[in-house]
Image (tube, grey):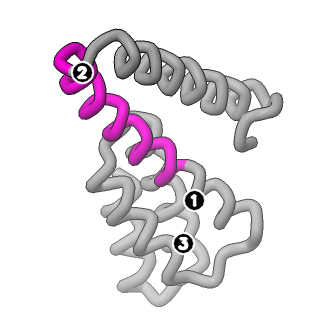
Amino acid sequence: MPEELAAHWEAAGDRSRAAAQWVEATARRGACGVAESACRAAEEALRHDLDAASRWRVLGSRDDALQREGLDARAALAPALGPGAEAERAWRVIHHARMVGGAARGGRGRG
């Protein structure tokens, strides 16, 4: 796991390699939609002196995980709130998929 490797690199005093592992950990957690652990990994990554591309990746991965968590919560509430809420939830799901998909393809998403 990248978190374990990061801890080992930090213990060895290699902050550059530790930072790279924290970036990877954030990306993996963000891709899975695990918001709490993505945020923890992002916090650790952002403590390091990251280049702009790595910082961008960390912030995007954290944002993706938080958005997924919000989408899941809205999915549970939308039916009780009616067609307007369901339509908004659907729009948000599509918007999120386009953003993440565009980034994965190197298109107009975050990437």
Determine which of the numbered discs, if any, sits on residue 19 in the image. Answer: 3
Q: Which residues are magenta?
A: 61-80
Q: Residues within 10 Å of mark 3 (few under 14, many from 20)?
A: many
Q: Closest to the observer: 57 or 110? A: 110
* Left or right: 78 as drawn, with respect to 98: left
Secondary structure beneath dot 3 equals helix
Secondary structure beneath dot 1 equals helix
Q: Residues within 10 Å of mark 2 (few under 14, many from 20)?
A: few
Q: Residue furthest right?
A: 107
> Residue 7's quadrant in the figure?
bottom left
According to the picture, the residue beneath numbered tag 2 turns out to be: 81
According to the picture, the residue beneath numbered tag 1 turns out to be: 59
* Residue 2 in the image, given as x and y percentages of width and height: 40, 56
Q: Main secondary structure of the magenta part?
A: helix
Which residue type carries mark 3?
Ala
Mark 3 or 1: the one toward you: 1
Secondary structure beneath dot 2 equals helix
- What residue sits 45% from the left and 65% below the top? 42
* Residue 54 in the image, given as x and y percentages of width and height: 67, 62
Which of the two labelled residues, at mark 3 and mark 1, occupies the earlier sequence position?
3
Which residue type carries mark 1?
Leu
Which of the two labelled residues, at mark 2 and mark 1, occupies the earlier sequence position?
1
* Residue 80 in the image, given as x and y percentages of width and height: 17, 18
Mark 2 or 3: the one toward you: 2
* Residue 39 in the image, given as x and y percentages of width and height: 37, 61
- What residue sits 52% from the left and 75% below the top? 46
- What residue sits 70% from the left and 34% below the top? 103
Which residue type carries mark 2?
Leu
Report, in whole angstroms, how far the alpha carbon at label 3 lies from the one at label 1: 14 Å
Q: Residues within 10 Å of mark 1 (few under 14, many from 20)?
A: many
